[in-house]
Amino acid sequence: GEDVEQSLFLSVREGDSSVINCTYTDSSSTYLYWYKQEPGAGLQLLTYIFSNMDMKQDQRLTVLLNKKDKHLSLRIADTQTGDSAIYFCAVGQNFVFGPGTRLSVLP
Amino acid sequence: SAVISQKPSRDICQRGTSLTIQCQVDSQVTMMFWYRQQPGQSLTLIATANQGSEATYESGFVIDKFPISRPNLTFSTLTVSNMSPEDSSIYLCSARDQPDTQYFGPGTRLTVL
């Protein structure tokens, strides 16, 4: 089955850029997704990228896709304390989720 | 985008009882799903809720334990039956919209004593 991996923790200083990485095994997904989960809340769809794209930018968010290496990343520019959350990538026809990366933003 | 609501938002239940969670979507969607998120874990798909027919369960989940209904294109229920403390988790409803994007409800936080 699909295997999706992420680093579990990331700490950055406020104002720096954050890069959250995701690797996967299934290359059949048309779209690949990033979700954000704040404490005690459900999942918020942040952004997604179509599989025939290399990059997508949406305000402070940049998604990079390397299909050859099956690597997806989410870059958050000018990271703020409100960005502290768990970030999940999801790939594949059946929306298989990675384990989530807990982003901590230090003042 | 689809807006999804769930009831209840949280509950504390006794061992051996059952709880039914309701999920309402503000628009008609083709597919609805139920996920479980155990403490500190990622999401695990329980089943796909099929409108007008039996749900499709993932490996490790069975209808007797997690009966699901989906009477129309905007509503679904998940029942957690004969609960044990191991069922303590967040249960999330999800709906798939166009273009192939998936949205989540706020979740139901269940604690079983």
Image (spheres, rainbow, N blue to C red):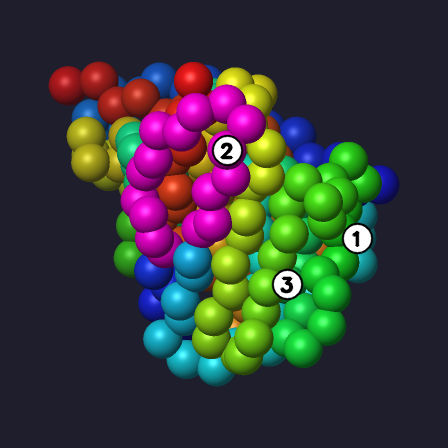
Circle 2 residues within 10 Å: few <14, some 14–19, many ≥20:
few
Residue named by callout 1: A27
Say whether residue A80 is magenta. Answer: no
- Do tag 3 and tag 2 residues touch (Cβ < 8 Å)? no
Circle 3 sits in a helix, a strand or a loop, which is it?
strand
Discs 1/2, front: 2
- Work out whether residue A12 or residue B2 is closer to the camera in this orientation and state it: B2
Specify start and end residues of the magenta stretch as a single range.
B6-21
Circle 1 sits in a helix, a strand or a loop, which is it?
loop
Q: Is residue B5 visible?
A: yes
The Cα atoms of the two marked residues, 3 and 2, are separated by 23 Å
Q: Is residue B41 above or below residue A71?
A: above
Could you say which quadrant of the image residue B43 lies in?
top right
Could you say which quadrant of the image residue A75 lies in?
top left
The three-letter amino acid code for the residue at tag 2 is: Thr
Residue named by callout 2: B17
The Cα atoms of the two marked residues, 3 and 1, are separated by 25 Å
Q: Is residue B96 above or below residue B90?
A: below
Residue sitting at 67 percent across and 69 percent down?
A: B50
The Cα atoms of the two marked residues, 1 and 2, are separated by 42 Å
Residue named by callout 3: B49
Residue sitting at 79 percent across and 53 percent down?
A: A27
